[in-house]
Structures are given as structure tokens and as C-alpha cells.
Image (cartoon, grey):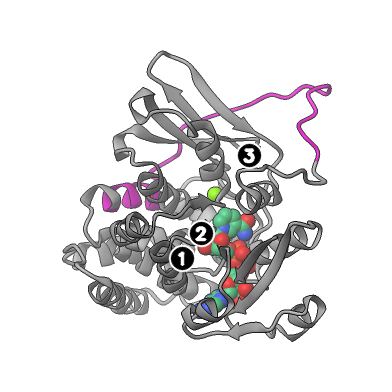
Amino acid sequence: MKRIAVLGATGSIGRQALEIIDASSELDVCALASGSNDLDALAAERGVEHVQVGGDLTSLLDESEPDVVLNAVVGFAGLPATLWALERGVTLALANKESLVAAGELALAAQERGGGLLLPVDSEHSAAFQCLEGRALETVDSLVLTASGGPFRGRTREELEGVTRADALAHPTWRMGPKITIDSATLANKGLELIEAHFLFGLPYERIEVVVHPTSVVHAIVRFRDGASLAHLGYPDMRVPISYALTYPDRASTPLDGLDFSQGLSLEFEPPDLETFPLLGLARHAGESGGTYPCAFNAANEVAVAAFLAGRLPFLGIAGVVAETLEAVDGAPAADLDDLVQADAEARRLAESAAGALVP
Ligand code: NAD
Ligand code: MG
């Protein structure tokens, strides 16, 4: 029996994870956490004693002693749980990409000390992990991450001037929490994923490419040095990568169907429009600059997305706030967690003031 701490249990990933765990005789929930939603019903149904709403989740993890931490908290708030698992060598099933983006080097150093598994839940990274598994890094030429392009694919900047919260929340292929849905509409999500992939797989940024693939059937492609490419395909359903991470290395069965080719299946790809969606380029630049630039990119983006969702910032202002913040921070590397928390706070302060100046 694998005992799983489900962090972010009331969210999109958390609820789908509970569905997988409840259907399995080999998986059990040992702890539940959320940001603000009440967990009493979820805990009572499953007889879970270790429950926490908000705050630092590390004491919950100390008490519940999980075999696997499923980190499906949204945002930088997921960082302590990520570091807790990596430091102790407890298997980390990571949906909370923001923590790895913000704390990449510190997280990898913690994993090195802890010696445990870091299993991506993000669909593209789960796909890439599966294509790369067991293969020497020197045989890899490059990694291709696919992006759906979001609800605004094909639009120009002018056409995005008046878009509303509801327009931006209407994602064409995935049903997800509000923050990542906005990130998908701006392509910031793919920017975060680019940085996430760099830390997960140890590839330099120039060997990680992003392509737009509107139907989200191909999740990732790895090109090898002999000219062969391996791709991972499936209908867009997060229960597949969640189940893979929770049951690794077993790959348990799920109730989901494999692809049906009998009706024909065409796969279309196009380059991303970096002019209309500048956050992808800003993320690449932040990643390449290193230090705490990725942390600042993430922090500014969190602030800007919250402001957009609250109606305090126009859609195009999200990229404006992030660009301005990245110009203003020093990006110096963080020697420890205190440094990183400071860099995050400073970027948030700068982003709040940039957003304040852009009130619609
Ligand atoms: P969501 O908004 O639906 O859920 C977020 C969960 O985190 C909620 O349970 C919320 O209560 C909890 N939470 C928020 N702040 C918290 C805090 N301070 N402490 C503890 N819990 C807190 O978000 P989601 O769509 O499920 O996404 C969760 C994470 O997974 C994000 O990092 C996202 O980028 C990533 N992800 C999501 C999807 C998807 O399909 N939804 C796909 C890939 C990656
Ligand atoms: Mg993804």
C-alpha cells in the first residue's frame, strides 16, 4: 500500500488524484491539504486524520509520513512541500511546477541529498520523462514541448486588447484551475514548463523547443542524435499522468481509452507567436539568465494573473507587469531558501506596483 499526501486536494489536479486513489486497492490517502477550502467531508469519507487548511504544510507531512507527496498546490506556496519531499528522499509527484521554476537549483540540490524520485505530473513532462526513461542524456538531441495555444491562438495583439476574464478562462482542450488556465491563454504556462523541463531533464534551453499543437494529443517529443524521434500521445486527460506518477514504476490501468485511429487522426503543429504572446519569450530569457530570474518571472506572473482575475489589470498587462519586474530585479542567485523567499517577495512588490500603474 502506498500512502499518499494529497496537497491541493480540492483543486482540479487534487480531485482527479483522489479519484485515481479511491479506485485503487494499492493507493491510500494519508493526508489532505488545501489553501482555504474545507476538507472535513473529504477527510471523513476516507478516514484521514491528518488534515490542514492553509499555512506551512511541512508539519502535516512530518506527522503523516507519506510514501508519496502529490504536490498539487497552486503557486509558490507549494515550495515548502516540494523541498520537504526532495530533502527526505520521499517520492514527489509534482504538479506544482511553480516551486521547481522558482527554486530550481535549491530543489535539485535537495533531491541530490535526499536521493528520492521526482516524478512530473505536468502532462508534457510526464510524457518527456517516459520518452527519456532509461536513455543516456548524450543520445538526446532535443526536447519538444507541445502547447495547445490556448483560447487566443491565431489572434493578434490588437484583438486581445479587450478580452475578458471569461474569454481567457475558456480553454479549448484542458479543464483546469483558474491560474493555470490564464497561464495557458498567455503562454506563460509553456514558459514555466520550459524552465521546469530544463531543471527536470538537465537540458540547456537551446535544446528545448515549444511548438503549438492545437488538439493536445501529442504531449511531448524527444529527438535523438540518430535522427529518430519518440513522441507520447494520448487524449488530453490529466488522470493519465497523475496515475503514472502515483503508480510508478507499475503503470496501473485506468478507465481511460487509448487513441482511436479508425476515424483518422491528423496532427498539426505550428510555431508559437512570440509577438502576441511575449510571456513565452520572457520565460526563456529568464531561464537563460538563471539566478533568481525564474523566481522573479514566476512571482510577477502570479501577481499579474491575480490582478487580471480580480479585474484590476487588462489581459495584455500581464506580460507588461512581468517584463517590467524582470527589468527591475537584480536576479542574483539565491544561496539558500531565505534568499529565495526574499527574491520572491521583492519581485511581488515590484509587480504589484507595476500592476497598480496599469489599472484599466
Ligand atoms: P486549482 O486552483 O484547481 O487547485 C489548487 C489547490 O491548491 C486547491 O486545493 C487550493 O485550495 C490549494 N491551495 C492553494 N493555495 C494553497 C496553500 N497556500 N496551501 C495549501 N493548498 C493551497 O489548481 P490546479 O489546476 O489543480 O493546479 C494545481 C497545480 O498543478 C498548479 O501548479 C498547476 O500549474 C499544476 N498543473 C495543473 C494542471 C491541470 O490540469 N489542472 C495540469 C498541469 C499542471
Ligand atoms: Mg502542462
Main SS of the magenta segment?
Answer: loop
Locate residue 142, reporting x and y percent. Answer: 39, 29
**Residue under numbered circle 1:** 85
Kind of residue indicated by mark 3: Ser
Q: Answer yes or no: do the residues labelled 1 and 2 have beta carbons within 8 Å?
A: yes
**Closest to the observer: 59 or 193?**
59
Q: Is residue 310 visible?
A: no
Task: Report how far apart the C-alphas of labels 1 and 2 lie in the structure.
Answer: 6 Å
Which residue lies under the disc numbered 2? 92
Q: Is residue 81 visible?
A: yes
Q: Are marks 3 and 1 in contact (CB under 8 Å)?
A: no
Observer-nearest of 155 and 98: 98
* Magenta region: 257-286
Q: Which residue is mark 3?
A: 216
The answer to whether 233 is drawn above or below residue 6 in the figure is above
Q: Is 194 left or right of 346, judged from the image as shown?
A: right
| Residue at position x 55%, y 81% in the image | 63
- Secondary structure of the residue carrying tag 1 is helix
